[in-house]
Amino acid sequence: MGRHKTRDKHLPPRMILKSGRYYWRGKVDTKEVSQPLGDDYVRALLKWRDIEGLHDGCETVSDLLDSFIASMPSSNEGTLKEYSRACARLKAAFSGFGSMEVLPKHIAQYLRSHDKPVTANREIAVLSRAYATAINAGRFDGQNPCLGVDRNPEKKRKRVATLEEIALIQKGEGPIPIMSEMAILTGLRESDLRMLRLDAFNELGLTVTARKTENTTNATVEWSWTPSLKACHAKAKLLRRRVGSIYLFAGKDGQPMSVNAFQSAWRRHRQKCGCPDLRFHDLRRTAINLAKAEGGTDYAMQFAAHSSVATTEGYLANVQVRKVRPTR
């Protein structure tokens, strides 16, 4: 029996990360073998699945979760890593459990005993999706034990950037101030900004298909040119980038800025600006509320590329100020 991992716990068994590349390391005919899987996490997972010969059965919770992760080749790297981390924690909690042995009471116990209630909600959501995927694929004949179990109460985030904070985060050197300004102007998510290509801009403006929904609604938004958007785009084009790079906010290798690089740079920037509790996603909430103030809820829904007005109202209701008069 191999040793437990002390690092990269989000990776499946026998997959390791070394110098930015993934490897499968295990025994073949009693000999220790290492096989390269590449530097792309999604493709590495597919190769790992082939080497492992992942079977279609889901006898244990670990089998169920491994099959679920291996069946998600279309997800982006950030989503896969977050799901993999959740699966690693779930495997540890349900070690030794057969997939048929998990009952709603076990789910409730996991939710109530977790030291981070909101994180517990997210992890059980992953487990629920893993069961649903196995059921729909015909690999599991039981019931989804996560259904019907109340999640831990959550307080929705209300934070928006003030006018003073907007002015502060748009100042400074490097890509982060410009990305912050573009997030305020367009409401684009971090992932969409990081992957923004030079050819997304044309004579009419900016056209983006949201990465988060490209496999569902495939929502595309076109922003027409405004003086502010033109100025922001011009500043972005002046950023240093590798010759031949097709990305507006590229890393040193010419590829899109990685999640880790962006998050580290954003944390440093917000701290320097005196906004330590401001999250980058708060800028999207700010932009959607500005759009609502300009054109109403329906316009805000189109601006945010939401498929449901209820989703848009979730961004608006938390920060909406209703002006009234005293009774006398």
Image (spheres, rainbow, N blue to C red):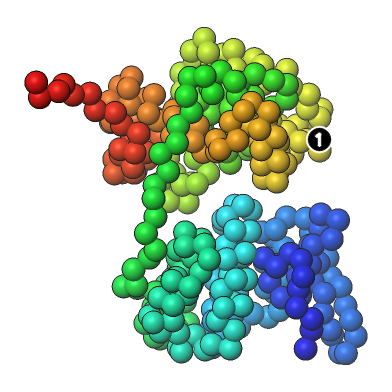
Which element type, helix, strand or loop, lies under badge 1? loop
The crowd level at tag 1 (other Cα within 10 Å; few <14, some 14-19, many 20+) is: few
Q: Residue at x 34, y 30 (%)?
A: 300
**Which of 276 and 326 lies nearest the eye of the viewer?**
326
Q: Is residue 318 above or below residue 326?
A: below
Q: Is residue 311 above or below residue 240?
A: below
Q: Position of residue 76 (x, y in %)?
A: 59, 52
**Which of 106 and 276 lies nearest the eye of the viewer?**
276
Q: Residue at x 31, y 73 (%)?
A: 148
Q: Is residue 140 above or below residue 264?
A: below
Quarter placement of the C terminus:
top left
Circle 1: residue type: Lys
Q: Is residue 58 above or below residue 40?
A: below
Asked whether, in this view, residue 54 is left or right of residue 227, the answer is: right
**Which of 22 and 2 lies nearest the eye of the viewer?**
2
Q: Which residue is mark 1?
A: 252
Q: Residue furthest right?
A: 31
Q: Residue at x 29, y 44 (%)?
A: 310
Asked whether, in this view, residue 98 is left or right of residue 48, the answer is: left
Q: Position of residue 319 (x, y in %)?
A: 35, 34
Quarter placement of the N terminus:
bottom right
Q: Position of residue 210 (x, y in %)?
A: 49, 40
Q: Residue furthest top?
A: 227
Q: Quadrant of residue 152?
A: bottom left
Q: Position of residue 45 (x, y in %)?
A: 68, 65
* Residue 153 visible here: yes
